[in-house]
Image: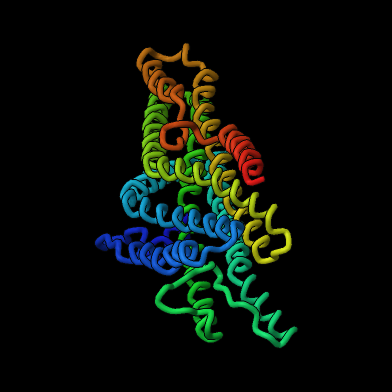
Amino acid sequence: MQFIIRLLQILGFWTQPFQKRSTAKPLGYMVLFFVWLLLPEIIFIVRQEPTFAIVARNAVECLLIANVILLIGSTIVHQSKLEESYGNMRFALDTIASNVDSKLLSTVTHLGSSTDRYFKVYVGFEGIITLVYALANPVLTLTQYIQSGELPPLHAIIESDFYMFDFTSNVWLWLLVVIVGGILLCFLSVDIVSINSLHWSLIHHATALFKIVGQRLSYLNTFSDEKSQSRELTDIIKMHEIILRSVRLLEEVINIYMLVQFGTCIIMLCIALIVLILSIDDRDLLVKMVLMLSYVLSHIMLYSLLGTELISASDSVADAVYDVPWYQWTVSEQRKVLFVLGRSQRMTALTAGKFFYINRDSFGKTLQTTYSYFTVMKQMYG
């Protein structure tokens, strides 16, 4: 988690200690992605009048780039809430550090190691997709040139029309455009990795902290001293409130973005499937569409799985309250338990624009909706 925060600080998405907040870098990324990646692709669709398969592929790429720009903008706007949510969770974890219980400490240790492991896997996955996407077309072009001795039609990594100059008329200009486009794709990938890793890590931490609250509740009956038991119960109530506040802040940050993500996911999947059917002989197009499908599905699926775990972990707190012998305690302690019970009975979950909860069911319904729309589009296209 510390490495993710450090990466966000380098990229300008996180305020470093004792420094004034600056949005110059993130805004610069948004401008670069729009001017060099998104706008030229839109101009290409308008001016070049390509085939339906090419238009569909470009539409998927435009939606993806627009999603990333929206993600960066959302992070800029809600940076203070993300920092507050992270600070609350760090405070909750620090309060556990002084606990002598070995099971709680092992849970905290496992939380840190699992977060680092998920981050490494995600970096590897995103790195492979980015490299293959960036290198597929240039490598195929150069390979064809070496084998045949004739230069094939030149295309950028992302099909573009820069309007002011024609990069397909000169091989060196084409190479420059490919290099700049590859660098920007790498920056795009780094931004996606850093911001999504922060979201996923915060959800993962909240899930683990809910489980820790349940564990601490189950240990209440082991206290022989009534004052120690009352003090521990008070600490649990405070910790539970901190976690709930952190999740609420995170949900406020990502709910609109997730609504757009789920909506564009359906559109992108439908278009990508149509392109796969129409372009069986175009290797570059097939490779890019398969990578797009992998990227979109993996992100939606991971958010859905983490959302399910968060709901389950928050519900487990209520189960832990029922398991403790609260009926043997004093009236004041029973009132404290009611606070925990009342809060835990309200579902703690991530939503997509407040319309539906993000969980495995929403992921399944998204796939069903996608398949329904795909069959309709297939019949309409004939």
Q: Position of residue 62 (x, y in %)?
A: 48, 57
Residue at 37%, 59% in the rendered image: 13
**In this image, 87 relative to 146: left or right?**
left
**In this image, 278 relative to 118: left or right?**
right
**In this image, 247 relative to 216: left or right?**
left
Q: Position of residue 347 (x, y in %)?
A: 46, 26
The reply to whether residue 69 is in sight is yes
Residue at 50%, 46% in the rendered image: 264
Q: Who is closer to the viewer here, 56 or 67?
A: 56
Q: Position of residue 223 (x, y in %)?
A: 48, 26
Residue at 39%, 67% in the rendered image: 35
- Name the colouring of the figure: rainbow
Q: Who is closer to the viewer here, 223 or 203?
A: 203
**In this image, 69 relative to 156: left or right?**
left
Q: Quadrant of residue 56?
A: bottom right
Q: Quadrant of residue 333?
A: top left
Q: Quadrant of the C terminus?
A: top right
The reply to whether residue 10 is in sight is no
- In the figure, 202 relative to 141: above or below? above
Q: Who is closer to the viewer here, 177 or 195?
A: 177
Q: Who is closer to the viewer here, 230 or 252?
A: 252
Q: Position of residue 128 (x, y in %)?
A: 62, 64
- In the figure, 120 relative to 100: above or below? below
Count of numbered badges drawn on the protein: 0
Residue at 57%, 47% in the rendered image: 110
Residue, far left: 20
